Image: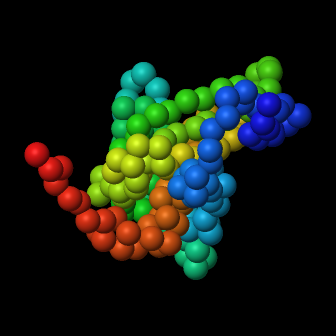
Amino acid sequence: MVVVGESNSTIVSCTRWRRVTDADLVALVSDEVFQPDVVWKLLDLQVTCGTLGLSTATVKLIDADGREHVACSVGTGPVDSAYKAVDLIIKESVSLLEYSMNAVTEGIDAIAMTRVLIRAEKSHLSTHALTGELVHRTFSGTGAGMDIVVSSVKAYVSALNKMLGFKEQNPTKASSIKRTPASS
């Protein structure tokens, strides 16, 4: 048995032996361990929603230089309107691929843990560690809070920070990949 990872006293193990390559390690580090410098941080969030009107959100983010940015947006729900307001500030086109939320604690004041997966519209290309195929790079983010919209926005901003940090770290990697046609 090989210990692959450890989390809160739970050991994840694998009984099948597999050679771990440098590409595998790079993929693990770049996605899960990579914690970029905080480019954006949630400062304030106000949401109005209900059955009789459009959901609206006002989001205030602070950038790495300490400047505050505010945007307002409407959406199909409180999370959608908040995400659209964040997009107006950050000015990066992204697609939300996955959204999940779980209660971490019990009761009326439960803490929500949100996880999102995003991909840039002008997607970064990476090489899949096992297959060698070019794939569109995705970025995950998590957030927690007693308010589900705050938890959701924290997760979204976390994923955006990873994406922006990766973009700064590898500015020309996606454009420098040479594609060779398959031989017939």
Residue extending farthest to the right is 9
140 to 59, vertically: above or below: above
Q: What's the residue at 74%, 40% (across, down)?
A: 4
53 to 61, vertically: above or below: above
**Quadrant of the drawing holding the N terminus:** top right
Q: What's the residue at 58%, 74% (across, down)?
A: 64
- Measuring from the top left, give residue 49's x and y in whole percent: 47, 32
Q: What's the residue at 54%, 46% (across, down)?
A: 140
Residue extending farthest to the left is 184
Residue extending farthest to the front is 184
Q: In this rendering, does residue 71 appear at all?
A: yes
Q: What's the residue at 67%, 29% (across, down)?
A: 16
Q: Say which of 39 and 165 sits in front.
A: 165
- Measuring from the top left, give residue 115's x and y in whole percent: 58, 38
25 to 140, vertically: above or below: below
163 to 5, vertically: above or below: below
Q: In this rendering, does residue 31 appear at all?
A: no
Q: Say which of 111 and 183 sits in front.
A: 183
Residue extending farthest to the bottom is 65
